[in-house]
Amino acid sequence: MNKDIFVGFWMLPNKSICFLSYSKIRNNQDAVKSKKADQGNHECEVFGYEPEAEESAYAWDTCSKNPGHPRFIPVPEFCVDHLPKWCADPAIVECVKTMAALTVRLRVSYTSWGRPDGYSFSNHRGSNFLHTGSGWVRNVNAGSGPCQCLECRQSSAPSRTWYGVHLETARHVVYNTEEAQATMVDFFYDDERALVDGWSKTVRATKTSIASRETDTCKVICIIHDQDLADMLQQYLIKTVIMDSYSVCAVFSESRKHLCIIVSHPHGQPKQVTFGAEPLYVTAEDYYRYISYSTHTCPGSSGAPVMAVELVSRPGHKKKFCKNHASLLPPHSRYLQGEGLNQCSGLLGRFRGDSDSYPMRIIFTAPIKV
């Protein structure tokens, strides 16, 4: 059999036709499989031998980590009935929906030569096989002066109306500015209709600002000209409230009830909500703290926002009112092999001592009856 025989084609975004031979597809399949294995316990999805949408759907249908995805809830369908009784409150649903609106899909089409030996994807430096992850919007700032995006820097008439959208993700998803410039960011990809109806928005990332290999966190900046998109993101950010700083070892007591919620793009698919009702566990390594949880994740969940809802009693209160705190933790980083748990990126600071508390973002706090 001639292994180079033509077997298929598809239309690329630039309207050109891409023809593939059997040997080309087979080589790409092997390369994709190799890159997937090269990330260790991290959870990016990798594509590269068929059109992205088809590969994403196939990865979802054939997933071996969570076959059938029974614990994954599409964001538009998520409601109070999905929550455990102790926290079945509409305000928590609103909290999750708000965070979901700020969650983004990241599609990284280049692996930088800057990744060090032994790091995730380091054996595929310089390759163009796409990997995907998740992230979320932390802030939106109106720019001043001439726009700093690549197109405007090359233009004789740069725009003076622009916004900086600051994202957070895991560093193994977007390692540096070189990879950021090869990253497409998808906003509001909640379901397939969002693509058809034009509700989903896609922009190219511009650079990374703060990145840490030790904690596996990365700040990515996008520069946009779309005022409607900026206004929409700012409206969702207004719903989040900066509260207080808590010590992780003090907040996450195993004697309290916890709910850990993640919104992500598993396998590059539309947003899904997952949660685990078991206690969260905190471990320490040197100066870093890591929080583990039973919440289900899949390839493509790397970098996703992790929310921890905790039931905190009011001592001495006759009516036994309680308070739910929803704290935004660092991004999802990895699964723990053989333990049935997943883990977020690291928190910098000593494990004990209130002076080293991590400034979590509290995105919901309200009293409920139990």
Image: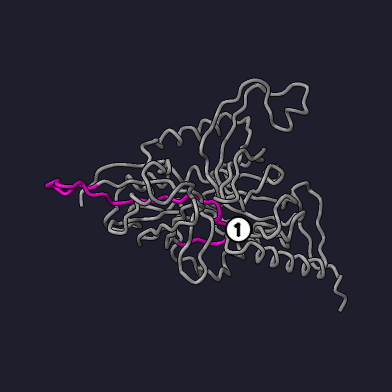
The colour scheme used to paint the residues is: one colour
Name the chief secondary structure element in magenta: loop
Magenta part of the chain: 296-322
The structure residue drawn at horizontal position 11% and vertical position 47%, both measured from the top left corner, is 318
Q: Nearer the viewer, residue 271 or 367?
A: 367
- Per the image, is 303 magenta? yes
Whole-percent x, y for residue 257 in the image: 30, 57
Whole-percent x, y for residue 8 in the image: 79, 64
Name the amino acid, label 1: Cys
Horizontal arrangement in the rendering, residue 239 relative to residue 17 (left or right): left
- Per the image, is 166 magenta? no
Whole-percent x, y for residue 235 in the image: 46, 33
For numbered disc 1, what is the local secondary structure?
A: loop
To which residue does mark 1 refer? 44
Horizontal arrangement in the rendering, residue 214 relative to residue 262 (left or right): right
The structure residue drawn at horizontal position 46% and vertical position 69%, both measured from the top left corner, is 339
